[in-house]
Amino acid sequence: MIILVGQLRPYKLPMDNYIDMANEFAICILIYHLICLTDFVLDAAARQSIGGSVIALVTLLLVCNLGYLSKNIIAKVVRK
Amino acid sequence: MALAAGGAVLSYVVINIILKGSLQQLFQSIKKLQIVVHMSLVNVSMPGNASIFFSYLLQIVAFDVIPTDNAYDAVFGFEESQPVSTNFELTGYESVYFIRNMGSMYLLYVLTLITLLLLAATSCSESMKVHEYRQMVKEKLFWSGILAFIEDTYIILCVSFSLNLAVLYDETTPDSHFGSIFSLVTAIATGAVLFSMPIIVGVYFPRNIDKINECDIEFKQTFGVVFEELNVKRHGKSVFALPVY
């Protein structure tokens, strides 16, 4: 998906392409976290830290997306 | 954090409705979050902090605003069924029945059916106002409304459909009452739409690319939800790989 969006740039707005790629990249990193949550890591403290890292990354994803949406809606309100 | 995000999403929807804007960008973000939340279905034991965070996030991304489980149990007579695993239970798939897993989204099925019946009932009316309303509802529902619903809830529909199919292979689940059969039939009908959807998008839209490039207003009103954000003029047919994906 990152390759597709990166090569084609399919969205009309350039920022949409970047946001989509950032989202896909974040999902890739989150999937790497899952490897660390298998039985290879049994240390409870380490698992909690990995959980914290997952939360931090999803929060970042959420903030980026909501920030972009807020920017668009504020621009729309100002234009009106 | 999840509550703040929920508030932000709600205010975005309200402001956009007031400004008559498109909610497409919001749904695009929610789709990505749906993938993130469904990541916890993978059979690894999530740490407690991440599980709690995902359960809050789920309420936003699953559009499950009305608690419907008890109502469905009463109407369809669903019997108690075990969730496939703890991961599924924590992600909100507490049952194997399609209708129950869909939650308040299933009400949109009912709403569509009622709208179709109303459209059929008012087809003979000669009043101008009724005709205008019929035209407006038709434009919203066919096909942009239905396509938007399928596109934005694709992952939830797929998981619910697959879970309901598992009933056929599970001997422990009670499967001979009305609710169970009705749920299975609905799941199979939805599954057929889900499987055909990428094929339809991948074949129909590239064939009608001239209409998109010529800005055919009627075509845009009917199917605009699929290509509204895409730069079709610049990239041509290849751009439809994205909605198919």
Image (spheres, helix red, strand yellow):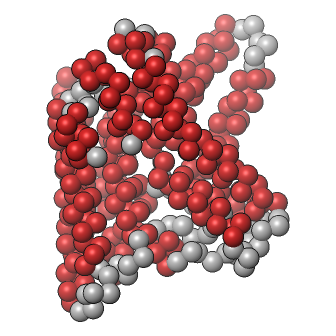
Residue A69 appears anywhere in the view: no
Image position of B66 (left or right of B29): right
Task: Name the residue at 52% across, 32% down.
Answer: B200
Percent x, y of residue B59: 43, 60
Residue A50 spot, x, y in % from top left:
22, 78
Residue B48 in which image quadrant: bottom left
List x then y, in percent, for residue B64.
Answer: 50, 56
Q: In the rendered view, does A55 fall on the left or right side of B156? A: left
Look at 49% across and 12% down and name the residue there: B218
Residue placed most toward the observer, A30 or B79: A30
Tally of numbered tags: 0
The front one of B15 and B217 is: B217
Q: Quadrant of residue B118?
A: top right
Considering only vertical position in the picture, is B230 above or below B195? above
Quarter of the view holding residue B47: bottom left
Residue occupying image coordinates x 55% and y 20%: B139
Q: Nearer the viewer, residue A1 or B124?
A: A1
Q: Relative to A69, is A41 above or below?
A: below
B195, above or below B222, in the image: below
State the quadrant of the C terminus of chain A: top left
Question: Could one spot residue B111 in this view of the protein?
Answer: yes
Q: Give above or below for B237 relative to B178.
A: above
> Farthest residue toward the bottom?
A43
Point 38% across, 78% down: residue: B44
Answer with left or right where residue A64 lies relative to residue B132: left
Percent x, y of residue B141: 57, 28
